Amino acid sequence: MALSLEDILAARHRIASGIYVSPCVESIPLSQLTGAHVFCKLDYLQRTGSFKERGARNALMQLDAGARQRGVIAASAGNHALGIAYHGGLLGIPVTVVMPRFAPLIKVSTCRQLGARVILHGEALVEARTHAEALAHEQGLAFIHPFDNPQIMAGQGTMALEILEQTENIDAIVVPVGGGGLLAGMGTVVKARAPHIRMIGVEPEHAACLSGAMAAGQPVAVPLKPTLADGLAVNQIGSHVFEALRPVLDEVVTVDEASLALAILRLIELEKSVVEGAGAAPLAAFLAGKLDHLKGKRVVLVLCGGNIDLTILDRVIGVGLVTDGRLSRFTVSISDRPGGLARLSEIIASTGASIKEIVHDRAFSGPDVSEVRVVCTVETTGHPHIARLHETLLAAGVRLVG
């Protein structure tokens, strides 16, 4: 079944009463950071924290009476499950969701709070989906695929209709890619209404299923590795999605984990927005230098997911600070006599660095008992500051180890 602009226009009318029209706002700090004229589509402001509600509601509202009564089942790492659970509750439809065991705790607990029956199964999303399809057959439930479903794609595409109404003279829209349903739906709208706008997909290097499909000319399974963008961790793009995507996709790029962490940090600092790894992927592409050709252009970044697990947020911020050169750790060998540590502290302070932690390592400092290794963690202002700190230590005769 081909996806059309008419399908998406119908979906917008169908879901209007239950979906928030999220703002698409200009970002001065991100424009200064990237060199592009940046607008941010803040779809993480949906009730459950992601764009997935759009497709979920569109699919649920097209079920017949019998299917509504029996209920639905979905497989998801989180956001699709949340969307189905929330709108299933609003529409009085029983919902079961199968989530992989690694799914973020915040998404698992929120699904339960929304009234869904949650089943944790498998180490990866593909295992959860296989189990969900088996349960659908056994229990007579309607299986709602998270992306390879024309109704889902049509619902997701409604975001592009809003963007075109909220902005003018846009040159490119940068969209996160997991299963590709969002990009397929949005691209269908954009190429029908404003074909000059470039549609650019961003996916993590650890789950590059669209890049793999484009290279092969068809959907292919790619190996998955753990990624901060857990919502994009899909090993194979769907056949319906690929059919809809090929004519509307202009470019796809991949981003590394450090860039994802740094993008999350930048959005917290500059936009005051707490966005999950998947939602931060468009900015990560700029930070990784993958979109330098968009400098000077008017660009929309689709920030479409905000359900980051708070138990790992501090770790993500830490990784971002290290990547940014604002947190540094080094080991030095100093005299183990009185005044040795005080002198080291003075040298560090003289460079403007702030000491976060100092740990003595006597047992593994080597045979010279007059010296001790010290592991230092310091706050700095960036990589040039770290370089100056190391130069100052060496000039003062402090030996860096490792």
Image (cartoon, rainbow, N blue to C red):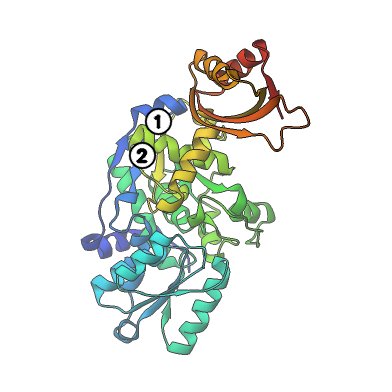
103 versus 393 height, above or below = below
Please, what secondary structure does the residue beneath circle 2 have?
strand
Q: Residue furthest right?
A: 367
* Residue at x 53% of width, y 52% of height: 247
Q: In the image, 47: left or right of 367?
A: left
Q: Amino acid at mark 1?
A: Leu
Disc 1 residue crowd, few under 14, some 14–19, many 20+, Cα 10 Å: many
On the image, numbered disc 2 is attached to which residue? 40
Visible residue check, residue 83:
no
246 vs 363, nearest the viewer: 363
On the image, numbered disc 1 is attached to which residue? 30
Residue 10 at x, y percent in the picture? 30, 63
Residue 158 at x, y percent in the picture? 34, 55
Residue 22 at x, y percent in the picture? 28, 48
* Residue at x 60% of width, y 56% of height: 209
68 vs 268, nearest the viewer: 268
Q: What separation in Å lies between label 2 and label 1 (alpha carbons)?
A: 9 Å
Residue 32 at x, y percent in the picture? 41, 24
Q: In the image, 204: left or right of 169?
A: right
Visible residue check, residue 64:
yes
347 vs 277, nearest the viewer: 347
Q: In the image, 338: left or right of 314?
A: right
Q: CB of mark 2 within 8 Å of CB of mark 1? A: yes
Q: Residue furthest left?
A: 17
Q: Amino acid at mark 2?
A: Cys
